[in-house]
Amino acid sequence: MSYQHNLIRVRVWDLPTRLFHWSLVICFSGLVITGTVGDAALVFHFRFGYAMLALLLFRLIWGFLGGRWSRFGSFLFSPKEILTYIKRVNSVDATPGHSPLGALSVWAFIFFLIVQVASGLVSDDEISFSGPLSHFVSNATVSLATTYHADIGKWILLALVLVHITAIVLYTRRKHRLVSAMLHGDQHFAAPIPGSRDDLYTRFFALIIFAVCSAAAYWVASLMPPVF
């Protein structure tokens, strides 16, 4: 019997987490394209932005209520654990969920996505588009947010995406199938590891949460002042 057959298949990524991940990829790509094209495409840029807001709200909640390896507590590592992992990175076997380095990438990406979306909500291009919350803050805040959103934040996110893709390629060369695990949800391990709950109940629960988050994003969008 081959080594692969001796491995234990474990559900690591529940379906809601996987759908979140690939929806995030689509929204981020849409935001980059529409933000670069500009002009009429900015209408769709805003729509992708509201979708991103709903996704981020969902992920923040799912980080406490989701499957075992989707919860924030599963990828909180101390500086010592991170340094130990870095020293042994070439000899460490596949880990369930996020590795210490992968966790750093995820935390950074979530943080800067939140900042980017928040800055977009209060930005104003002084031509034809302004964020729905821009009229609730001072002109100085609007100016700072607009500069960050257009000239700083997007480059930070693109750099993080590049690092993320590079890491996936390197891990794949070491036969850590990260992409396939995010497609079907399972990883294989030599020893028993607790899996994430991923049944009809959790999926329906996630759907309710996302519906609420979408309603919240829609409400934020409705705060846009009327254009005369």
Image: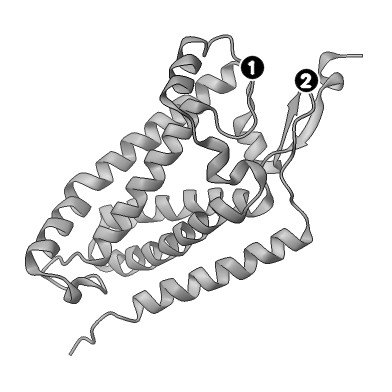
Percent position (x, y) of residue 144?
12, 56
Count neighbours of disc 1 (C-alpha within 10 A) and say few if under 14, some if 14 to 19, many if 20 or more: few
Percent position (x, y) of residue 107?
42, 40
In-front residue for pair 137/183: 137
In-front residue for pair 30/208: 208
Which residue: 68% across, 48% down? 14
Q: Which mark is residue 102?
A: none
Residue 121, placed above or below residue 223: above
Report the coloring of the rendering.
one colour
In-front residue for pair 184/136: 136
Q: Could you tell me if the residues under marks 2 and 1 are in contact, i.e. CB atoms within 8 Å? A: yes
Which residue: 56% across, 53% down? 64
Horizontally, residue 190 falls left or right of residue 97, namely: right
Percent position (x, y) of residue 214?
49, 71
Mark 2 or mark 1, which has the lower sequence index? Answer: 1
Q: Is residue 129 visible?
A: no
Residue 181, placed above or below residue 46: above
Q: Which mark is residue 93?
A: 1
In the orientation shown, which residue stands out farthest toward the left?
140
Amino acid, disc 2 = Ala
Badge 2 marks a residue whose secondary structure is loop
Which residue: 36% across, 36% down? 160
The alpha-carbon separation of the residues under discs 2 and 1 comes to 10 Å
Amino acid, disc 1 = Asp
Q: Give the position of the N terminus as an image quadrant.
A: top right
Which residue is label 2 attached to?
190
